[in-house]
């Protein structure tokens, strides 16, 4: 039964399903897009207050419509009421912040809960007032995609289009506003105007989202996709795109689930689907995800361990045979004393290095292959140049030392490297006795 | 918002000889009924390096923000090259306090420097290659061109400060307002900033710098404004930066005054 339903939904057989899925997809994309800017502007919770505060407006609009003799289900009228309620809420927040010393979290908490409470009371009154008519109003609290009609879809499409156009045209202005509002103001950008534009976008997205997601959970659509997108990128442009995509996919997944299992409110399902994508992003996000970061750390540690092994062998054979040709056997016991590794760790390092033919290994002795020798000589040279650089350019060095760079020449200017090489040549003691202060090892 | 053509002509006007880069008259700023700075009044000589010093909470940042019309003024007038700020904005470069922004923001260093050109690019228009080239030159100028593509949270404090400096320099303004550019930077960056300030002076630019380290004031600046809600004194460093004036600005912290006297002596010797 459920499987055939799922099939129907996925194949978009039903006209209404098509409307709903397209509608929530656009809604998810628009809120993801707008949400990435409000998150960066640190105004996400304004959207929450706005959504909660819309409830009394919505119910009052319904009451007026009923009193005027209609059935109160006129969509534009209800949304107009919701918008008025939301804006009144925002106005109260701004008023409290302007004329009291209350902090933002307190003002948001007060306004959000009081407006929502008022809305719930008004809703109770309408239910006493007449039987049946007001039943549909609860859908705005938790969302019900099934009640979406063609007109709602069109309204969402228009909102999405406006969001894309405005954020596209004003992209660099919004970027500057979110990063550094004071500097934006000093350049003549009208900060209040841009903030208002951003707020209008939030209002539009929130209001058209009330029906599908519901006013309690609408804030999730503004926050979760943007927060999830941050794990994938360090560029604001890609952040906006990824955030919109996550919003889109999450909304479609959630709406599909709620279409198949009709008892589950769509708003909650959409939020949970977005949360799933958030979890995936948090663990696997390429830039800031937990696992890629662990992986990079492991790779780095392995690389450093390999470098320590090669340099250790090189320096030992250099000390014993005056030069460090490939084929010089050095004893494991000497090598073991060079660093803080234990014999098990050392053997494992040697084994992995042997696999890629950098070293040869026989009982208790190890030697560099010619490939290993070339690599070890390069590493040792790099290391000594960096060390010299730290000593001779101590004032500027710490900011530039980059042992991870493959070649010192990629970081330092050519003449600096040349000078360091001359210093290295005229420092025979240092070369003969490579017991150097390992200032950089710990980094 | 004014069109680019009009700005060009304003620019030319403002570099005319004799125009005072920054003239503040009777400026008072108040938050929540409490005045933060009051009756501030001074004219700055063109082509000088000006230090603004004063204790914490003396209203130094507020003064700069009030000059740029970022905070409402309760009274007073500010003229930048003989005009209100909003008419000579293109000619003023601003370096805000480093801590005033979130460095975790998803942009790279080049992006931040390019922000200094948004006014020239034009609102609502895309940034072009020539703007990125200019921003790149500014990064080279402050010595961190190799970090252009690095996300800004991966820059050290000194490198972040250099990025902010480059964002102001890229504008090629005639007046620079800098809010504590020396705060918590490494010695190399401090040296680099001082060099840039001297170079600006050579090119007849004016820089107004909020500064905390009294010891270096005589070495870095040639003009000083002592501020503690009101202007205690302003003028050439040799005349104004005296123990008596500092006592009036900071109250009687004698150890500090000794250090300053020592620094002034060093300056006299080097002159």
Image (tube, helix red, strand yellow):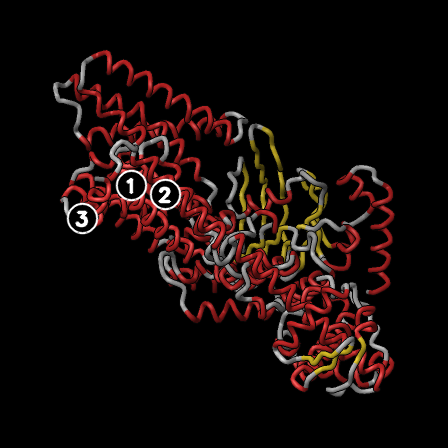
How far apart, in angstroms, are the residues tagged by discs 1 and 3?
14 Å
Do marks 1 and 3 both belong to one polypeptide chain? Answer: yes
Residue at mark 2:
A273
Give the secondary structure at mark 2.
helix
Give the secondary structure at mark 1.
helix
Residue at mark 1:
A257
Q: Which mark is residue A12?
A: 3
Q: Is residue A383 above or below residue B216?
A: below
Tag 3 or tag 1, which sits nearer the N-term? 3
x and y percent of residue A65 in the render?
A: 17, 22
Chain letter of disc 2 in the image = A
C-beta proximity under 8 Å, tags 3 and 2: no
Among the 4 quarters of the image, the one containing residue A239: bottom left
Counting other residues with Cα less than 10 Å from the Cα at mark 1, is it few (<14), some (14-19), or many (20 or more)?
Answer: some
**Residue at coordinates 46% horizontally, 48% vertically from top-left?**
A178
Tag 2 or tag 1, which sits nearer the N-term? 1
Tag 2 or tag 3, which sits nearer the N-term? 3
**Residue farthest to the front, as pictured:** A363
Q: Is B107 situated left or right of A78 in this image?
A: right
Q: Is B58 situated left or right of A53 in this image?
A: right
x and y percent of residue B12 in the render?
A: 47, 64
Chain letter of disc 1 in the image = A
Q: Is residue B138 above or below residue B249?
A: below
C-beta proximity under 8 Å, tags 1 and 2: yes
């Amino acid at each position: 039964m459920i499987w055939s339903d799922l099939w129907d939904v996925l194949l978009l057989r039903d006209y209404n399903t098509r409307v709903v899925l397209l509608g929530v997809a656009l809604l998810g994309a628009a809120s993801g897009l707008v949400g990435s800017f409000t998150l960066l502007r640190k105004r996400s919770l304004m959207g929450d207050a706005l959504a909660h505060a819309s409830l009394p407006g919505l119910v009052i609009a319904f009451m007026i419509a009923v009193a005027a003799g209609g059935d109160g289900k006129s969509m534009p009228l209800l949304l107009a009421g919701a918008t008025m309620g939301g804006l009144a809420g925002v106005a109260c927040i701004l008023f409290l912040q302007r004329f009291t010393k209350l902090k933002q979290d307190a003002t948001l908490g007060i306004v959000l809960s009081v407006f929502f409470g008022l809305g719930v009371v008004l809703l109770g009154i309408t239910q006493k007032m007449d039987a049946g008519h007001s039943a549909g109003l609860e859908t705005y609290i938790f969302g019900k995609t099934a009640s979406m009609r063609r007109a709602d879809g069109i309204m969402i499409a228009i909102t999405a289009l406006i969001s894309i156009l405005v954020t596209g045209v004003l992209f660099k202005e919004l970027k500057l506003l979110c990063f550094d509002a004071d500097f934006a103001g000093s350049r003549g950008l009208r900060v209040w105007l841009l903030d208002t534009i951003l707020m209008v976008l939030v209002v539009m997205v929130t209001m058209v989202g009330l029906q599908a997601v519901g006013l309690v959970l609408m804030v999730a659509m503004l926050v979760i996709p943007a927060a999830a997108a941050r794990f994938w990128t360090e560029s604001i442009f890609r952040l906006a795109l990824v955030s919109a995509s996550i919003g889109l996919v999450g909304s479609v997944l959630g709406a599909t689930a709620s279409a198949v299992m009709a008892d589950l409110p769509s708003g909650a399902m959409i939020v949970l689907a977005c949360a799933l994508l958030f979890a995936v992003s948090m663990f696997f996000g390429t830039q800031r995800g937990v696992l890629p970061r662990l992986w990079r750390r492991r790779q780095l540690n392995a690389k450093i361990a390999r470098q320590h092994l090669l340099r250790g062998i090189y320096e030992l054979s250099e000390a014993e045979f005056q030069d460090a040709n490939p084929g010089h056997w050095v004893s494991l016991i000497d090598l073991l004393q060079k660093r803080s590794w234990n014999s098990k760790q050392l053997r494992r390092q040697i084994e992995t290095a042997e696999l890629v033919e950098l070293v040869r290994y026989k009982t208790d002795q190890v030697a560099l292959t010619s490939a290993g020798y070339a690599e070890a000589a390069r590493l040792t040279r790099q290391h000594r140049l960096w060390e010299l650089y730290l000593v001779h350019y101590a004032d500027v060095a710490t900011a530039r030392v980059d042992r991870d760079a493959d070649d010192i020449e990629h970081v330092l200017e050519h003449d600096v490297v040349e000078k360091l090489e001359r210093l290295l040549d005229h420092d025979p003691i240092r070369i003969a006795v490579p017991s150097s202060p390992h200032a950089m090892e710990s980094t | 918002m004014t069109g680019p053509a009009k700005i060009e002509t304003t620019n030319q006007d403002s570099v005319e000889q004799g125009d005072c880069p920054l003239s503040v008259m009777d400026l008072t700023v108040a938050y929540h009924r409490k005045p933060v700075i009051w009756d501030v009044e001074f004219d700055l000589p063109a082509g000088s390096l000006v230090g603004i010093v004063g204790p914490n909470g003396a209203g130094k940042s507020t003064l700069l923000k009030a000059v740029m019309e970022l905070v409402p003024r309760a009274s007073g007038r500010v003229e930048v090259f003989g005009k209100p700020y909003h008419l000579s904005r293109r000619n003023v470069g601003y370096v805000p306090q480093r801590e005033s922004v979130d460095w975790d923001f998803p942009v790279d260093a080049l992006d931040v420097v390019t922000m200094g050109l948004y006014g020239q690019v034009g609102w609502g228009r895309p940034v072009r290659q020539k703007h990125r080239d200019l921003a790149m030159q500014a990064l080279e100028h402050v010595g961190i061109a190799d970090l252009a593509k690095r996300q800004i949270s991966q820059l050290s404090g000194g490198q972040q400060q250099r990025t902010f400096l480059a964002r102001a320099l890229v504008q090629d303004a005639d007046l620079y307002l800098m809010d504590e550019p020396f705060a918590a930077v490494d010695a190399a960056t401090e040296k680099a900033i001082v060099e840039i300030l001297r170079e600006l002076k050579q090119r007849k630019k004016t820089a107004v710098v909020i500064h905390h380290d009294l010891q270096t004031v005589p070495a870095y600046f040639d003009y000083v404004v002592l501020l503690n809600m009101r202007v205690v004194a302003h003028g050439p460093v040799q005349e104004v930066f005296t123990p008596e004036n500092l006592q009036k600005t900071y109250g009687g912290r004698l150890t500090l005054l000794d250090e300053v006297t020592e620094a002034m002596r060093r300056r006299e010797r080097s002159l």
